Image (cartoon, grey):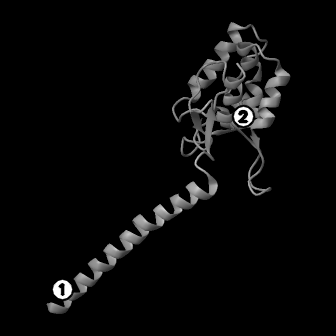
């Protein structure tokens, strides 16, 4: 009985020590390295000393003058209807069926937090944004190119457009 009690105390002490080290000291040290080595504003989008968003988290943009990111999981049909209503309102010559859209335009990301869309998804929205903002298509294409991130490590995935960064360019140049 005394041996079992001694083992339980040792196990509890080890649990406490590792919880303190791995649950407190290690994350805090990583935070300090991130904060002081890489800078406190590395992933923030700042405009006029005001934080406008994060380049790492997708945000919902619903106004027609902004590019839309990936929809939430239950918004696929709503996204298609919203886009087709815009097409009808402005008498554009074609209506899209669900198969005409790039997949990421109507499907949610696994986490629901993805700030990126494909280049094709950005280009399919360019007429709407151009009409709503009064900007020439060429200017918006340049914004898309400025917001496009290359393949990760040069070979993984496809080039992708950061919607938050793209919309910040539109907002900053209004």
Residue 160 occupies quadrant: top right
Could you tell me which residue is drawn at 69 percent across and 25 percent down? 172
Image quadrant holding the C terminus, namely top right
x and y, in percent, of residue 62 in the image: 58, 22
Q: CA distance from mark 2 to mark 1?
A: 63 Å
Q: In this rendering, is residue 168 above or below 1?
A: above
Q: Judging from the image, what secondary structure is the residue with disc 2 in?
A: loop
The quadrant of the picture occupied by the N terminus is bottom left
The quadrant in which residue 45 appears is top right
Q: Position of residue 3 (x, y in %)?
A: 19, 92
Packing grade of label 2 (10 A; few <14, some 14-19, many >=20) is some
Q: In this image, 157 relative to 6: left or right? A: right
**Residue 148 drawn at (x, y percent):** 76, 40
Q: Residue at x 56, y 23 (%)?
A: 78
Mark number, residue 102: 2
Q: Secondary structure under badge 1?
A: helix
The image shows residue 96 at horizontal and vertical percentages of 71, 21
Considering depth in this image, is 49 or 140 the residue closer to the camera? Answer: 49
Q: Which disc is residue 132 wearing?
A: none
Name above or below for residue 135 compared with residue 7: above
- Location of mark 1 (residue): 5
Residue drawn where x is 67% and y is 26% of the image:
67
Q: Which image quarter: residue 149?
A: top right
């Amino acid at each position: 009985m005394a041996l079992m009690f001694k083992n339980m105390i040792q196990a509890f002490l080890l649990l406490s020590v590792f919880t303190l080290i791995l649950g407190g000291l290690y994350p805090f040290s990583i935070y300090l390295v991130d904060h002081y080595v890489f800078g406190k504003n590395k992933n923030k989008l700042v405009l006029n000393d005001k934080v406008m968003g994060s380049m790492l988290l997708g945000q919902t943009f619903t106004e027609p003058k902004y590019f839309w990111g990936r929809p939430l999981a239950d918004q696929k049909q709503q996204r298609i209807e919203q886009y087709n209503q815009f097409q009808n309102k402005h008498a554009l010559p074609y209506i899209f069926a669900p198969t005409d859209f790039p997949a990421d335009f109507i499907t949610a990301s696994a986490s629901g937090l993805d700030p990126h869309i494909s280049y094709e998804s950005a280009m399919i929205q360019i007429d709407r944004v151009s009409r709503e903002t009064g900007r020439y298509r060429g200017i918006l294409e340049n914004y898309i190119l400025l917001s496009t991130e290359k393949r990760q490590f040069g070979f993984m995935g496809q080039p992708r457009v950061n919607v938050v960064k793209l919309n910040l360019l539109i907002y900053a140049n209004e």
